[in-house]
Amino acid sequence: MSLIRNERLKLAANFLNAVGIGLIGIAVLRPIVETGTTPYAALAGWSLAGLAIHGAAHYILGYLR
């Protein structure tokens, strides 16, 4: 049962990691592509959200047995 739990935790952490990295990528690339400039307030907000989700993925991995 522990192996199944560990694999489910890894899948959840991988999903959150991908979402977090995607948010950071969107925060950087979208404003540059759309306007050619970077609004730093939006960049900071989305990047912090992505880093928080990425951090949550690392936190979940702490529950592996």
Image (cartoon, helix red, strand yellow):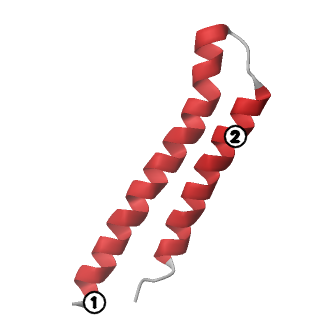
Which mark is on residue 13?
A: none
Point 48% across, 73% down: residue: 60
| Tag 1 near tag 2, CB within 8 Å | no
Classify 22 as above or below 65: above
Side of 15 relative to 57 (left or right): left
Disc 1, SS: helix
Point 73% across, 14% down: residue: 37
The residue identified by callout 2 is 45
Point 74% across, 38% down: residue: 44
Q: CA distance from mark 1 to mark 2?
A: 37 Å
Q: Residue furthest top?
A: 35
Q: Position of residue 20 (x, y in %)?
A: 52, 49
Instruction: Please tell me whether mark 1 or mark 2 is closer to you in this view.
Output: 2
The residue identified by callout 1 is 2
The disc labelled 2 sits on which kind of residue? Gly
Q: Position of residue 42 (x, y in %)?
A: 70, 31
The quadrant in which the C terminus is found is: bottom left
